[in-house]
Image (tube, rainbow, N blue to C red):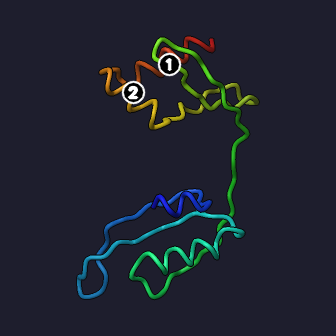
Amino acid sequence: MDKLLENNARDVFYTPIYMKKNRPAIKLEVICDGESMESLKEIIFRETSTIGMRIFKADRTVMNREIIKVSTEYGDIRIKKNPALRILLNMLQNMKIVKRLLRNSIYLRDAYREALKGIE
């Protein structure tokens, strides 16, 4: 997964599934743009045991958003905001921040509430 993400995959996830004759398998799904597809296919063929893949094209719709960095007692926290709708979309859960919060026994929701106070 890391190698795919490092090579411009937008997202990578897998799901345990059962194939014909009830054989266990892993379904790997990679979301990417057209420019990255060939290099990502090469990585998948090289790094897995697969001998084929199905490719689906999809449209993507994205809300306008801006990233706001808020300083809190827990450190800097980044929040996505939709400026047109004036709503907060969510806190970007940067793993470094999440790990730091958890090490200090701070709940993510508490850090989020603190961040919201900083932008009101």
| Residue 69 quadrant | top right
Residue visible at 62% across and 60% down in the picture:
8
Q: Horizontal and vertical percent for residue 102?
A: 33, 27
| Rendered image: mark on residue 100 | 2
Q: Horizontal and vertical percent for residue 95?
A: 45, 38
Q: What crowding class fits label 1: few (fewer than 14 Cα within 10 Å), some (14-19), or many (20 or more)?
A: few
Q: Amino acid at mark 2?
A: Arg
Image check: 28 left or right of 91? left
What's the CA distance linking mark 2 and mark 1?
A: 9 Å
Pick whichever of labels 2 and 1 is earlier in the sequence: 1
In the rendered view, tell whether residue 55 sits above or below residue 110.
Answer: below
Residue visible at 62% across and 73% down in the picture:
39
| Residue 120 quadrant | top right
In the rendered view, tell whether residue 92 sits above or below residue 106.
Answer: below
Q: Horizontal and vertical percent for residue 98?
A: 41, 31
Q: Which residue is mark 1?
A: 75
In the rendered view, tell whether residue 90 sits above or below residue 109.
Answer: below
Q: What crowding class fits label 2: few (fewer than 14 Cα within 10 Å), some (14-19), or many (20 or more)?
A: few
In the image, farthest residue toward the right: 84
Residue visible at 59% across and 28% down in the picture:
79
Dot 2 and dot 1 residues touching (CB under 8 Å): yes
